[in-house]
Image: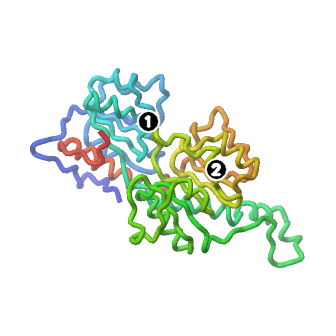
Amino acid sequence: PITQSPNHPITQSPNHPIPMSLKIVIPDASTLNPGDLHWTPIQRFGETYIYEQTHPTLLVERCQGAHIILPNKVLLTKEVLAQLPELQYIGITATGYNNVDLAYAKERGIVVSNIQGYGTYSVAQHTFALLLAITNRVKEHHQAVLGGQWARSKDFCFWNYPMMELANKKMGIVGFGRIGKYVAKIAQAFGMNVLVHHRHPVDEATFDVQVMSLEALFANSDVISLHLPLNANNEAFVNADLLAKMKKTAYLINTSRGGLIQEDDLFNALMNGTIAGAALDVLSEEPPTNGNVLLGAPNCIITPHNAWATQESRMRMMQILEQNIQSFINGNPQNRLV
């Protein structure tokens, strides 16, 4: 748990004392902390400016003079960073880092770190919340009960949607980092066989999984779950060709980044019955203020990018954020991206 007592001060290195003149800006604080956590551990590092949300047109103005910026989703592009000459450190309050221009930050000598491992349990849990919602049709049957269909049934057991048992089904996991490994562990507890595609070698015997090519995984899995960061090399990699390889009875789950999926292709696959369904916690534009084709897709569950957002997960994030800032000040940044 996060210690917020004044009796638990931040540890300072004698060789790298915390400068009292540090200016810290948190431009979209409500994403991490809607009010149920305290910023006290961060405020001890310097003069801290906390904004619930920041419109792009106000970002440079609010971050002027900042030595440290702690963003969650705001875009720190080259154009923005170029106008912040005093910036020394960006502490992303998330695992994903596609909202920061890392190449330019490196060119400028700005240290960038992210927060890793905080949401492993919560995201894996949400992955199976989505999967069970699809396979057991929980919401649909609840609504049927409220609508009186069970009361009117001649039998004491009632269902009007097909359900699927997970035991002995194949769970395909694309991306086998912390979250992917924990998803595999849960899948195995359900009696599922786990297939894996990962950019680095995976010890099949240790994890009791079968490693295969991306195409083979999409062709053989009953459920496919994405657990990898978005970058220029994998943007929209789930396209019509890959979706066409899936079983008609298979489901696609995405709790990573919406940009991993070509959404028009997924919409067509759902409309045409190419796959059985999809469950998504992320979209290409968030929030979908301009609409999204998948909002009208059949057999598609969408949650509002909240897989990571349990209080327990966010408390861990705040604790790691504090450690990240301290390690930067001490001259030995942890979780460093550049």
Left or right placement of residue 37 versus residue 163 in this view: left
Q: CA distance from mark 1 to mark 2?
A: 27 Å
Instruction: Identify the residue under disc 1.
Output: 99
Left or right placement of residue 149 versus residue 129 in this view: right
Instruction: Identify the residue under disc 2.
Output: 243
**Front residue of 307 and 248:** 248
User: Can you say which quadrant of the picture contains the N terminus?
Assistant: bottom left
Q: Which mark is residue 188?
A: none
Write the residue at 43% across / 44% down.
96
> Label 1 sits on what residue type?
Asn
Label 2, residues with CA under 10 Å away: few <14, some 14-19, many ≥20: many
Q: Position of residue 60 (x, y in %)?
A: 39, 23
Write the residue at 66% across / 42% down.
265
User: Farthest bottom residue?
Assistant: 156
**In this orientation, does residue 183 appear?**
yes
- Earlier sequence position, callout 1 versus callout 2: 1
Q: Relative to residue 220, is residue 115 depicted above or below?
A: above
Q: How many marks?
A: 2
Write the residue at 18% across / 44% down.
330
Left or right placement of residue 101 versus residue 129 in this view: left
Label 1, residues with CA under 10 Å away: few <14, some 14-19, many ≥20: some
Write the residue at 63% across / 63% down.
222
